[in-house]
Amino acid sequence: MNSNIKRKFKILYIIGLVLLFASLFLEWYVFQVYNSSDKLIAYWSYNPLIGWSTIFSKGSTFNNIAKPGELQMPLVLTGLFMVILVISGFSVIFKDIESQNDLEKLFPYSYVNLFLIALNLYYIFAFPVFYLLPHKLYFPFLLIKDREMDVVYYYSIGPGYILQIIGFIMIFPYSTFYYNTLVRFKSKEQSPDKVIKKYVQHVQETLDLDKLIANEELKLKFVDKPIDIKEDFEFNYKKVKKRRAKP
């Protein structure tokens, strides 16, 4: 890959990380209700860190009644997502592939980057499917007029969720390049010639052909002619006794 293109992908990756981090502090979903005079009478916005929040006071009865159900997105997962974002940013800025001599040490960071993509995809697809739609919060946006109550319900995704999508698009190219580069490096390091060379260097033992041939002949002798342990013991015992009997 051209170095100029890699540099652009790296810059996009860093910008994408910033957008993903910022998205966690913005609105992911917005639910609004307007009366016949286009006056806002209910407002609720959802953020994965703090849940539902509103611009109205607690005394607003209709706003309290219109509050959507709790989505209960796991806060631990959101915290993990923030940690992975920080580690991934560290790997790209301080553990760049082109500036490192020992690429084997970068493999853990490549897996962190892939895990970040997986978490990002989880938020992008699981958020609407498992959290919004079961609570009848329409996706990505919908306007419903209730003629009986003479109000208008407006459902829409927020800027935080949009930044999740944009951030994923920006981090995906460099993440795959980072991982594929290390995989190609590992496959070259595991080539047969290099494996044999490393093994010989590790063993550091000269090959003794005479010793090897003698060992193989000894193995064949035992295979062709089974040894009688009792007979061999008696023979050796008599031989030792005879030597002791000599003056």
Image (spheres, rainbow, N blue to C red):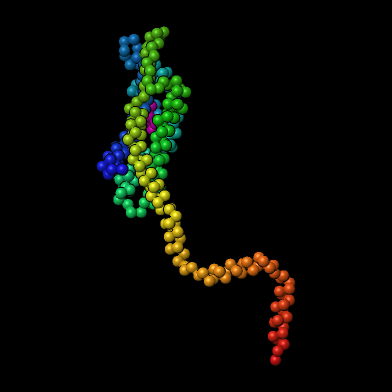
- Vertically, is 197 above or below 30? below
Q: Is residue 47 magenta?
A: yes
152, 10: nearer the viewer: 10
125, 239: nearer the viewer: 239
Locate residue 117 relative to residue 223 in the image: left or right.
left
Residue lying at the far bottom in this picture: please name it.
247
Residue depicted at x 50% and y 70%: 208
Residue depicted at x 43% and y 57%: 193
28, 11: nearer the viewer: 11
Which image quadrant for residue 2? top left
Residue depicted at x 31% and y 12%: 38
- Vertically, is 36 above or below 174? above
Q: In which quarter of the image is the C terminus?
A: bottom right
Write the start and end of the magenta stretch as one range.
45-50
Residue 3 is situated, as x and y percent measured from the top left of the image, at: 27, 44
240, 37: nearer the viewer: 240
Residue depicted at x 35% and y 30%: 165
Residue 118 is situated, as x and y percent measured from the top left of the image, at: 42, 37
Count of residue discs: 0
Which image quadrant for residue 14? top left
Q: Quadrant of the N terminus?
A: top left
Specify whether residue 86 is in view. no
Specify whether residue 116 is in view. yes
Q: Does the magenta stretch include residue 196?
A: no
